Image: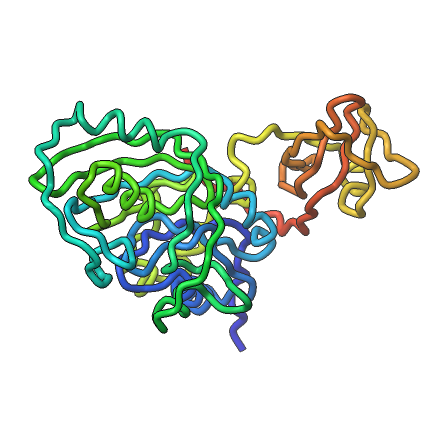
Amino acid sequence: MTRRPSVPSGVLAVDKPAGPTSYEVVALVRRRLGARRVGHAGTLDPAATGVLPILIGEATKLMGYLADHDKEYRAVVRLGVSTDTQDLSGRVLTERPVPSLASGDMEPVFARFTGRIRQTPPMYSALHHEGRRLYELAREGVEVPREPREVVVHSIELESVDGPRVTLRVVCGKGTYVRTLAADIGEALGCGAAVETLARLRVGPFTVAQAVPWPDLERGSAEALRERIAAPDTALAGWRAVQLDARAAEAFRHGRGLDGRGHVLPSPAQPGRDAALVRVHGPDGVLIGVGAVDGQDGRLRPVRILHADHPRARVLPA
């Protein structure tokens, strides 16, 4: 009996086409690689395209950290129309004339939606309300109150204007709904707006140019896909790294804290208020987990522990 090659833990960035749900991408990766633990970092709407990072094996423990990375989108927005889904797939609610707009007219509006802003999640979203997804309720014609949430929009750049269509490049933080951002900008311009197409260009260090094309995921060899899996620590790109010697690494793997000189503490370490998250590596450079370093005395406490499978070196995202 031929034994299937093991699947290394790590991150496989996929260039999702319009149509599949994020869950369907996860299911396809699971089938193609024969991996048991697979998840994604940051849902993409079925109609949206672009980067969807898929975490495999022990790297699934880093899902929340990767989802926290900034994201970059290109949105083609149709001015003069608003819909119940905030994109052109939905039911049209209003149609209004589009004023003659130059880029200088839009910049002050963009500034209003840049920085820390409050945004009401759309009904057509994957958020839960009393055990059900909001989009399930929306399809039944049910609308429920949603509390505005604070999100961060780093920048909104106008790439082009073509009649009622404007193309925006948006860099934003976790939890930002670009459809809602476009709809709010349309209201601020006095004409309404809905997203025509949405592409995610980047999630943290993972770019669409480096992502696995959809045909390769569907029909390429499993061996070629395994070669494209980036090491788990790419999910923590930009973090400070701490490398431990063999003795300290073994203690860390068993949930023990370390003092500022790397000595094992007799009892579990409690982080201070100013503790900072770091990625923790063993003596061979392999990621063994996430730790919290106390800013006052340098004590290191385990937060997430990975059981490393010692993958061979891979090319990391730039």
Q: Quadrant of the C terminus?
A: top left
Compared to residue 110, the image places residue 6 above or below, namely below
**Residue 247 at least partly seen:** yes
Instruction: Name the side, left or right, on which 264 lies relative to 88.
Output: right
Compared to residue 125, the image places residue 62 above or below, namely above
Question: Which residue is outermost to the bottom?
Answer: 1
In the rendered image, residue 228, in percent from the top left (x then y), is placed at 41, 49
In the rendered image, residue 103, in percent from the top left (x then y), is placed at 16, 26
**Residue 209 at least partly seen:** no
Front in this rendered view, residue 282 or 191: 191
Picture quarter containing residue 232? Answer: top right
In the rendered image, residue 32, in percent from the top left (x then y), is placed at 42, 66
Q: Quadrant of the N terminus?
A: bottom right
- Residue under the point 39% across and 62% down: 25
- Residue under the point 79% across and 29% down: 299
Colour theme: rainbow
Q: Number of marks in the image?
A: 0
- Residue under the point 17% across and 23% down: 104
In the rendered image, residue 210, in percent from the top left (x then y), is placed at 34, 43
